[in-house]
């Protein structure tokens, strides 16, 4: 069992930055690939970024490439999402998730076993 708690969301102007954190409980965090997803108004939940068990392999959705960076610290049981050059269309509820089937990570939300409660990101124009 893994419990995930996101933090770091908030209100920011377009062009600004936020750093999201996701703290995981349990001693098995390092065996899970991690992902960030978001739920934006009028859209289904979508993949944003993912990181492998080791932290060496990272995946990004096209709309965040060059702006967002995912990382993890297995010693701290935490995964991060650094978000720069934020746009109003980045507004949404951001979730972190953990899965154990694919050590390299996956973009498929159905493969993720554990989810946090989400943290709201609002970008004003």
Image (cartoon, grey):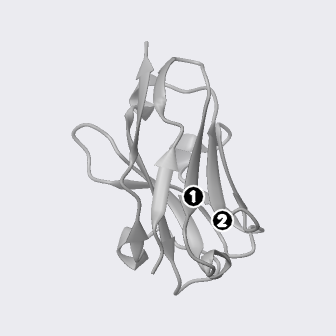
**Image coordinates for residue 119, horizontal then vertical, percent:** 41, 42
The mark found on residue 23 in the picture is 1
**Image coordinates for residue 101, horizontal then vertical, percent:** 52, 87
**Image coordinates for residue 115, horizontal then vertical, percent:** 40, 65
* Mark 2 residue element: loop
User: In the current view of this chain or complex, which residue is farthest to the left?
Assistant: 42
Residue 77 position (above or below residue 14): below
User: In the current view of this chain or complex, which residue is farthest to the front?
Assistant: 26
Report the side of 48 relative to 82 (left or right).
left
Q: Decide which of 108, 78 is in the foreground and name it.
A: 78
Q: Decide which of 22, 58 is in the foreground and name it.
A: 22
Residue 19 position (above or below residue 97): above
Q: Mark 1 to mark 2: distance in Å?
A: 6 Å
Numbered circles on residues, count: 2
Q: Which residue lies at the image location 75% right of the left edge and 74% below the top edge?
A: 54
Q: Residues within 10 Å of mark 1 (few under 14, many from 20)?
A: some
Residue 2 position (above or below residue 117): below
Q: Quadrant of the C terminus?
A: top left
Q: Decide which of 116, 91 is in the foreground and name it.
A: 116
The mark found on residue 95 in the picture is none
Quarter of the image for residue 123 reads: top left
User: In the current view of this chain or complex, which residue is farthest to the bottom?
Assistant: 101
Q: Quadrant of the N terminus?
A: bottom left
The reply to whether dot 1 and dot 2 touch (C-beta < 8 Å) is: yes
Quarter of the image for residue 28 reads: bottom right
Report the side of 92 relative to 60 (left or right).
left
* Mark 1 residue element: strand
- Residue assigned mark 2: 77
Report the side of 8 relative to 103 (left or right).
left
Q: Which residue lies at the image location 53% right of the left edge and 52% below the top edge?
A: 61
Q: Residues within 10 Å of mark 2 (few under 14, many from 20)?
A: some
Q: Which residue lies at the image location 41% right of the left edge and 59% below the top edge?
A: 116
């Amino acid at each position: 069992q893994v419990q995930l708690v996101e933090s770091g969301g908030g209100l920011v102007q377009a062009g600004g930055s936020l750093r999201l954190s996701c703290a995981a409980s349990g001693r098995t965090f390092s065996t899970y690939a991690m992902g960030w997803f978001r739920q934006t108004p009028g859209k289904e939940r979508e993949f944003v970024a993912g990181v492998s068990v080791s932290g060496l392999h990272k995946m990004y959705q096209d709309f965040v490439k060059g702006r967002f960076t995912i990382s993890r610290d297995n010693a701290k049981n935490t995964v991060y999402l650094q978000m720069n050059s934020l746009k109003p269309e980045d507004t949404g509820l951001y979730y972190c998730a953990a899965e154990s089937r694919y050590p390299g990570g996956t973009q498929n939300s159905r493969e993720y076993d554990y989810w946090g409660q989400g943290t709201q990101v609002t970008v004003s124009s």
